[in-house]
Image (spheres, helix red, strand yellow):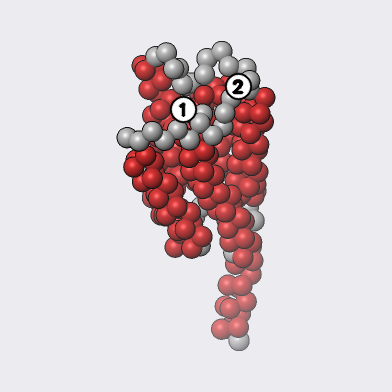
Amino acid sequence: MSPLIRLCSGVALLAPPVAAVTVLAAGWFAPGYDPVTRTVSRLAVPGASTAGAVDVAMLTAGLACIAVAVGVRSGIGGRASLALAGFGFVAAGVFHLDPLSLRLSAPHWAGSGLAVLGLTVAPLALWRAYGRLLLGLGAAEVAMLLVGLALLPTSFVAWGAWERVLLMLGLSSIVFLGVRIRRRERRMPSSEEAARAMAAVHSSAGT
């Protein structure tokens, strides 16, 4: 396994759990915060004591998406979607939600939308190459988005829980891809092994 692939798969395996635990801890210590009704972005509003931790979590999730985009070896659509998700997470971490300004909140919303879109499309684009579980995760994300659209005109308030389920599905696909990348790379012969195999074939043919 090449050092780059080892690094990418390691980041994909470790970064999402680290990001999730960071957000969980930030919500636990934030005074008066309700994770069921409040989204993750509310932990990073200007002046919040948990903003720095949530920014780190967003950037960590973005790094995981970019690492998988580098590590996968097939499916340009899947790689582009992962890169898009990574860019979206970074933008959401750099630009904060500002409840008092729609203009200042727009970059954060745009980044969050790109992250969700990329995480939804990537497993649907890569499942044939990396496993059917990705198809199930992608379909579940699409279902959650449709449920969210249906709930918009209602009095539904548990948007924090809805968002966390959606992100959990998306980041689970990142971890799964990290596992598959590592296993797939281990099964592939190295360039040196391939050269030896070709030399043995040529030798046998000459004999």
Q: Which mark is residue 198?
A: none
The residue located at (40%, 27%) in the rendering is 109
Question: Is any part of residue 78 visible from this angle?
Answer: no
- Mark 1 vs mark 2: give the one in front: 2
Question: Is tag 1's residue or tag 2's residue first in the polypeptide sequence?
Answer: 2
In this figure, which residue is indicated by the disc labeled 2? 32
Residue type at mark 2: give it.
Answer: Gly
The residue located at (57%, 28%) in the rendering is 34
- Tally the marks: 2
Category of crowding for the residue at label 1, using alpha-carbon neighbours closer than 10 angstroms: few (below 14), some (14–19), many (at least 20): many
**Local secondary structure at mark 2:** loop
**Quadrant (top left/top right/bottom left/bottom right) for the N terminus:** bottom right
**Local secondary structure at mark 1:** helix
Question: Is any part of residue 102 visible from this angle?
Answer: yes
| Mark 1 → mark 2, Cα distance in angstroms | 26 Å
Determine the residue located farthest toward the bottom in the rendered image. Answer: 207
Tell me the quarter of the picture where residue 99 sits. top left
Residue type at mark 1: give it.
Answer: Ala
In percent of width and height, residue 118 lies at 42, 43
Q: Which mark is residue 91?
A: 1
